[in-house]
Each structure stands twice: as C-alpha cells, then as structure tokens.
Amino acid sequence: MRAREVNVVWNFVNELSVKVFERERRLISSYELDRYLAGATKEGLHLHSQTPHAISAEYSKSRRQAKKVELRTGEGTLTSGRI
C-alpha cells in the first residue's frame, strides 16, 4: 500500500518537473518541489510527513545525475531525452 503512495508522489513530481521545464525551460529544484508537496499527507496519503520531501530530494538528485528532464516511471515509459 505504501509503495503505491510513494509511486504516486514520484509520478506527480516527475509530471510537475516536465511541465515546469516545458513552460520555463528550467529544472525545478527540490526546494520548489517541496512547496508543492506541503500538506500532501493531510490530503489522504498515508505516509510520514517527511517522506514526500525525501522523494523530491531523491528525484532531483537522480534527474541531475541522469541529465534528463523526465525520469522513467514504473510503467517502463521512455524518458524524454537529455537536457
């Protein structure tokens, strides 16, 4: 059950990152992602309050290392290319 909720947060962060890049041609930081995730656990996600923030930090780190705008999701979709 918790793995599904973690995947929901990861996919949300991934989608948000792509939208920001398409609109502003820049990568969104972990700090900015945290602002969008504030209150996520109060809205029905059964995760510890620090978990969404840890996910956004891990996502930002992985995205920087891969030098990609969008990372793979669990469905095995292809990434959108390099920066």
Image (cartoon, helix red, strand yellow):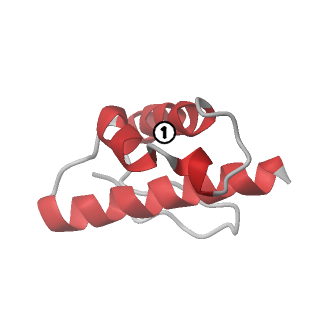
Residue 81 seen anywhere in this rendered image of the structure:
no
Give me the residue at 56% from left, 30% from top: 54
Taking 34 as reference, is 22 above or below it? below
Quarter of the view holding residue 63: top left
**Total numbered labels placed on residues in the image:** 1
Q: x, y percentage for residue 30?
A: 37, 35
Taking 26 as reference, is 59 above or below it? above
Residue 74 seen anywhere in this rendered image of the structure:
yes
Task: Name the quadrant of the N terminus.
Answer: bottom right
Q: Residue furthest front?
A: 42
Q: x, y percentage for residue 60?
A: 42, 37
Question: Circle 1: is it few (<14), some (14-19), or many (20+) Cα within 10 Å?
Answer: many
Taking 83 as reference, is 12 above or below it? below
The residue indicated by pointer 1 is 56
On the rendered structure, is 11 left or right of 45?
left
Which of 58/31 is in front? 31
Q: Residue furthest right?
A: 1
Which of 37/7 is in front? 37
Which amino acid type is marked by label 1?
Ser
Give me the residue at 13% from left, 59% from top: 24
Give me the residue at 68% from left, 34% from top: 48
Q: x, y percentage for residue 27?
A: 26, 47
Which of 25/37 is in front? 37
- SS of the residue at dot 1? helix
Quarter of the view holding residue 52: top right
Give me the residue at 70% from left, 61% from top: 74
